[in-house]
Amino acid sequence: METVKLTINDIKVEVNEGATILDAAKKIGIRIPTLCHHDDLCVAGRCRVCVVEQKGARLLQASCAVPAAEGMQIYTNTQKVREARRTILELLLSEHSGECTSCYRSNNCELQALAQEYLVIGGAFIDVSDKSPIDVSSPSLVKDNGKCIKCLRCVRTCAELQGVSALWNTHKGNKTRIETFLNKPMHYVVCTNCGQCVNRCPTGALTEKAYIQSVWRAIDDPEKHVVVQTAPAVRVGLGEALGMEPGGVVTGKMVTALKMLGFDSVLDTDFTADLTIMEEGTELLTRLKTALQDGKPTPLPMMTSCSPGWIKFIEHEYPSLLDNLSTCKSPQQMFGALAKTYYAEKIGVDPARMVSVSVMPCTAKKFEANRPEMKSSGFKDVDYVLTTRELAHMIRQAGLSFANLEERKFDSIMGESTGAAVIFGATGGVMEAALRTAYELVTGREVPFRNLNIEPVRGMEGVRAASIKIENVKEEWKFLEGAELKVAVAHGLANARKLMKEAEKGASPYHFIEIMACPGGCIGGGGQPIPTSPEIRLKRAAAIYAADEALPLRKSHDNPEIKMIYREFLGAPLGHKSHELLHTHYARRNRS
Amino acid sequence: MMNLDSTVTVAVKKFGAEREQLLPVLQYVVSKEKWLSEDTLAEVARVFDMSAAEVYGVASFYSFLDTEARGEYVIRVCRTISCDMSGKEAIMEALQKTLRISVGETSSDRKFTLLETNCIGWCAEGPAMLVNDEAYTNLTPEKVVEVLQGYMNRT
């Protein structure tokens, strides 16, 4: 590859052709402030806060957008640059409702940080911020145009990573806004509630809808028994929101914190992740049996149903494929349904006075918990969904020194889990967990991968495919002898769309497809700590796989509490009770 | 009333459904129906395999691609400085008084919509206005009433 040589602040640097001035500066440790730039997204060049001076050029250059060129002499810290940046920030602030003390993103706001850095004190320009009402229609997200600086990170996220484009820039000039189709409320458009825009919004214009106060009220109410479940990816993200480095596994500290916050039962969504594998694995084998042995038409490829952003996406965009979805509820909703039935009975608590809370790396889970069909227990199965970020807020409010907490174990029952459940948090994890169990069920042997690590379905490639030859099967699975099980994994809805286009034409070569709405899977979920980047997500994923390897049990069917719940309560996978509590149906939605 | 889907279909047959044909298709629909309804935008999005928000974003960028209901005759009065200085206010008053609507509104019989527009290139002959695609220049309040009368008498 061709390289170019330039100097930045008189320091020589050589970069590959095509690299921007910003990339070159990063390489030699010179920080240039940015707002619209994001490592996950294409260049926008909109906010101009990254301007630098180029010797010989009349105008300042936006370093995020201008490619480094041979012989360039760039200066990032001249008076001209400092004054320009300050003015740009003043202009941005003039269209921003600066309510920093009461803003949800205060202290985690890129605009606030830069305004502070450049000491932009007292607005030089009149307030032209958008006064339209805050959109609180969605149970997941809040959109406040008044805080929007039109950086288009949300628009680019929704288009490039998710292929949804629920948001777009509309109108022009000083009337430019970021809007949904016809400026409808967020709840009534194709938005999947994935929250990826929230992860990338530099200000408080897009945030999750917080349920912190409702949860505190439940905890404070002596009449209520408050049960909390925590998703796999929360334990590898929470630390970041509390001042720790990315890539740490904080399960034990998180459990201690939840107990100290006052939750009555601290349980694990990983338990129902294992349960999902039992149900979904059986469902897959049943469909294969119908197709291969009975020769009857059955919807294949089967597709996973754990990710509520993905579910809403397919409901809007590919309703003709809804029968391909597994009927399994997500682990969160399985947990909710069991908490107010099986668990309530076991611990002798009236489900009417039980409050079921989940902590999720996800904003779409808030929507999912509010779906009208999610009341199998006779009550709302999950009352409140908190994101990883909201839990971090509560931990700070309680004054806990998180990094110094001792490590404790989840309560029993519904607290036991295997490594197969932990990896649900990373893209490819559900597939890997399902294969570990299904292969063994059919052949009586462990999956033929070293140390149970099914590497072909791991990684950050947008779409990954793998196949496993099934041989020497047990008598009852004879129809699978010699079959090649073909699977695919996609993360990010733009990648999901590639697989769906194929499936819609009936041209999908796969038997089983895992889709996660968010890049990287749940570790990159819309409820995870901000910021996010490819690098951060790799660290979280590595932590997930390390947590898996550290566990004594790594296959869902080995979980003793899973065996117990089938023995005592559910009967068999796909049995009557399972159908009543653990399975669901989907709705057709329209495309606009 | 013309079937909305069929206008889009006709436009797409004429221009195709490649991305670069989005503006011609939207312009064609507006030329037939005066504005882009929710159904039209959703239909265009489906045919072009784009998000409805994006199609709306494109339409809302252009002043002449209306996304609000418009009357049969859309009057656009130039609000730019030379027209303003040559008496645009009096023209606007005459229009509002005669049509009994304010700027941005459509008459109850859905015949007229009154809007302002940026420069339409008739600076030398201001004040100027457009009625649909027809330009009227050197306007006086009396002339405006005459023009309106002509449209009112059309069937």
Image (cartoon, rainbow, N blue to C red):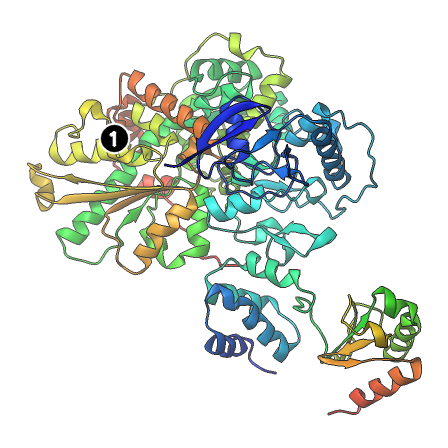
* Residue B11 placement, left or right of A461: right
* Residue B45 placement, left or right of A202: left
The amino acid beneath tag 1 is: Glu
Name the residue: 60% across, 30% down.
A74
Under tag 1, what secondary structure? helix
- Local packing at callout 1 (Cα closer than 10 Å; few below 14, some 14-19, many 20+) is few
Q: Quadrant of the N terminus of chain B?
A: bottom right
Whole-percent x, y for residue A459 in the image: 32, 32
Where residue A317 sits, quadrant-wise, is bottom left
Q: Nearer the viewer, residue A72 or A166?
A: A72
* Residue B26 placement, left or right of A501: right
Q: Is residue A227 visible?
A: no
Q: Is residue A440 visible?
A: yes
* Residue B68 placement, left or right of B58: right
Name the residue: 28% across, 43% down.
A488
Where residue A470 sits, quadrant-wise, is top left
Rendered position, B6 above or below A125? below
Name the residue: 27% across, 28% down.
A556
Whole-percent x, y for residue A338 in the image: 40, 32
Rendered position, A366 above or below A511? above
Q: Quadrant of the C terminus of chain B?
A: bottom right
Q: What is the number of callouts on the image? A: 1
Where residue A7 sits, quadrant-wise, is top right
Q: Nearer the viewer, residue A333 or A107?
A: A107
Whole-percent x, y for residue A268 in the image: 41, 24
Q: Nearer the viewer, residue A380 or A90?
A: A90
Residue at the spot of label 1: A455
Q: Nearer the viewer, residue B100 or A171?
A: A171
Whole-percent x, y for residue A474 in the image: 8, 36
Q: Chain of mark 1?
A: A
